[in-house]
Amino acid sequence: MAVLWQPCGDGARILRVLGDSPCPVLPGTVAGRPVTELGPYCFAARAVTGGSLWPVESADTHEVTGDFLEEAVLPDSVRVLHSAVFYNCHRLRRVEAGPHLESLGSDLFTNCKALRTFALRTAPDAETGLKKLLGAVSADVSVEFLGAPGARLFYPEYFEWLDENTPAHIFNHSIEGEGYRMRQCFAGGAVDYTAYDATFAQACVGESEEKLCRMALGRLLAPFALHDSARTDYEFYLTAHPGAAFGQAITERDEAALRLLVGLGLPVQEAAAQCARTGWSAGATILLARPKRAAKQYDFDDL
């Protein structure tokens, strides 16, 4: 892999990534400088001008842009994402970054219809740039905190629009979807898990079973800062919607989720059949396994 870059302050700004992998891991340093910025349209399928090649002897010429890009792993040193870095990357599904993102431009993820996950290499209680990342995506998106003990969060889609009051020429700003409220659950740059969990009751009014199960499973599988009352709410929802709960676990091929649902005592026959229909034998094995009975102990009173 190679990059086109230019100096910016004491760091380096990557203008373009070259290579043959659709899942590039960007370098932390370029020419001895820490990589602190990604330039405008860095991964977009449009020409960039200027910049120097690094490593200088690299023979890579293929640009990692547009529909070729599927995942991007950014170094911890990156603090700035300029406008439209991932513009029109239709197949981009995952972005991994460190905790230090602090400045994000506009149109970062415009037309990134396949984007599903932000992964952050830090503890779940750390202050990060997550709120700004979430503000750049109104569609469904999941968040993974990779640092111990880990956390998994799901933010459903929301919609914004302006209604014009024609005679008065006044525009009313309207927002639909609990995903917007969830994206505001932060305290000092860190996720406010209590506030996030508190949105679940209202989400049950307007969100689909599939999305609510994604939220519940994520919190129960990585229960960082999960209070007993919220745990009870999530478990109750899953037990009341076994079809959607198992469907989500099977779609994601999530063995841990299957074991959690089995542990809640949900009926497994239909889910096992669904695993068989989709060719997931490992999932069917988990669902159909039964704890072995302890051998009965006899004494003379049984004679």
Image: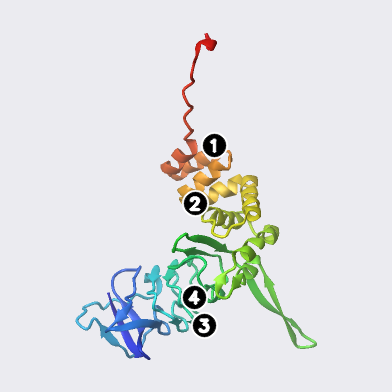
Residue at horizontal 51%, vertical 10%?
Answer: 300
The residue carrying mark 3 is 106
Q: Amino acid at mark 4?
A: Phe
- Whether label 2 touches label 1, CB < 8 Å: no
- Residues at marks 3 and 2, CA–CA distance in whole angstroms: 33 Å
- Residues at marks 2 and 4, CA–CA distance in whole angstroms: 25 Å
Q: Residues within 10 Å of mark 4 (few under 14, many from 20)?
A: many
The residue carrying mark 1 is 269
Q: Is residue 207 above or below residue 77?
A: above
- Residues at marks 2 and 1, CA–CA distance in whole angstroms: 17 Å
Q: Amino acid at mark 1?
A: Gln
Residue at horizontal 56%, vertical 65%?
Answer: 140
Residue 74 is situated, as x and y percent measured from the top left of the image, at: 39, 74
The residue carrying mark 4 is 109
- Whether label 3 touches label 4, CB < 8 Å: no
Q: Dot 1 lies on which element?
A: helix
Q: Dot 2 lies on which element?
A: helix
Q: Residues within 10 Å of mark 2 (few under 14, many from 20)?
A: few
Identify the mark nearer the N-term, 2 or 1.
Answer: 2
- Residues at marks 3 and 1, CA–CA distance in whole angstroms: 48 Å
Identify the mark nearer the N-term, 1 or 4.
Answer: 4
Residue at horizontal 35%, vertical 68%?
Answer: 23
- Residues at marks 3 and 4, CA–CA distance in whole angstroms: 9 Å
Toward the left, the furthest residue is 57
Identify the mark nearer the N-term, 3 or 1.
Answer: 3
Residue 97 is situated, as x and y percent measured from the top left of the image, at: 42, 72
Res 254 visible: yes
Q: Is residue 179 above or below residue 59?
A: above
Residue at horizontal 54%, vertical 62%?
Answer: 153
